[in-house]
Image (cartoon, grey):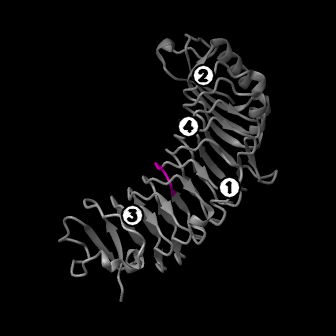
Amino acid sequence: MTPLFLLAFLGSVIPAIPCPDRWALQKIDVWTHREIGTRGQHVRSVSLYVLDTHEMIEVTKANVSVLCDGMIKNFRNLKYLTLVEANISRIESGAFQKLPALTHLSLAVNHLSSIERDHFRDLEALRVLYLSKNVIENVDEDAFLDLVGLRKVYLDRNRIHEIDSRWFLSNTQISLIDLSFNNVSKVQKGAFTLPRNSMVEIRLQHNEIEEVEAQAVISSAAEEEEPYLTLRLDYNNLTDITQSFVESMDAFHSSLYFDSNFIKCFAPEMLRSLKNVTVELQADSNPLSCDCVEAATSFMKDHELRAEFHFSSTEDCELPGLKPDNWNHIPQNIYFGN
């Protein structure tokens, strides 16, 4: 019986070669030494583990360069595939074939510059996809179209400039989209569509965002359903949060993060539309004025908003009914609405 393997190339570097059959992972015995014990006790330069469950393969610190057509196939019980720090710069169409159980795929810390639809066309069971820390600039509009079960996608620490509203339309189970540490400057209308009955986190912190349009996030949920959104926009270049954007948030219970931007005020009237939802508003390390903070908190209280307002100000603020003895020394202040 051909064994299946968990490979961890921790110390040695495999020389880059073209794509002969012997590089196909289903013929992995080219790389292994079958006399080594099942726990790899005698391995030094290359660590080898043979798993009777046939569920995991891990390759790191290799020099694979190209994932060729048919390179990884016929692992019918494989659930976890890790190809990290392997110098992968290109994926051919059909690189992944006949992997019906694969739920987790990591291609992090490589040199991929683009993601195309054909890269993942046969991975219908995939739940989690790591593409972190590559050099990705281009993502096809239908790159994730075939990943109908996708729940979490990590695209952080790449070079993405624009968000395509079509990327995740078919991923009705999505719960986490990580686009942090990229070069996005604007979040346009309809950039994200949340699935029904969802709790979704969208990470956009540490970009170059200067504008978030109204209805940047929309929901496909029915009127009686209550999706919950966590939207992270901290560490960007926002100077203003438009009233139209805030009004478009009335479809969600939400946690909105605007920490470490350049926002001077949240106008009270902007919060009016949030009366029927629960909102956590994080605005630490912004140049908020005391007048703005007082007006916003008073408005939330007077209108009985279910809001939680976290803020820090460049001024020494004193709010009615919220005056701790060491107010001026508190870096973060919290106002709880009703």
Question: Which is in the foreground here, disc 2 or disc 3?
Answer: 3
The numbered mark, 1 or 4, whose residue comes first in the sequence reads 1
Contact between marks 1 and 4 (CB within 8 A): the answer is no
Q: Is residue 179 magenta?
A: no
Which is more N-terminal, label 4 or label 2? 4
Q: CA distance from mark 2 to mark 4?
A: 14 Å
Looking at the rendered structure, which numbered label has been put on residue 205?
A: 4
- State whether residue 281 is above or below residue 322: below
> Could you tell me which quadrant the N terminus lies in?
bottom left
Q: List the residue tagged with mark 3.
A: 64
Give yes or no for contact between labels 4 and 3 (Cβ–Cβ under 8 Å). no
Task: Pinpoint residue 204: horizontal percent, then vertical percent.
Answer: 58, 40
The reply to whether the magenta stretch includes residue 132 is yes
Q: Residue at x 71, y 45 (%)?
A: 191
The CA distance from mark 1 to mark 3 is 27 Å
Instruction: Give the number of the disc on residue 141.
Output: 1
170 or 114, which lies in front?
A: 114
Query: Label 3 near label 1: C-beta < 8 Å?
Result: no
Amino acid at dot 3: Val
* Horizontal side of residue 271 vs 325, given as left or right: right
Circle on res. 262? 2
Dot 2 or dot 3, earlier in sequence: 3
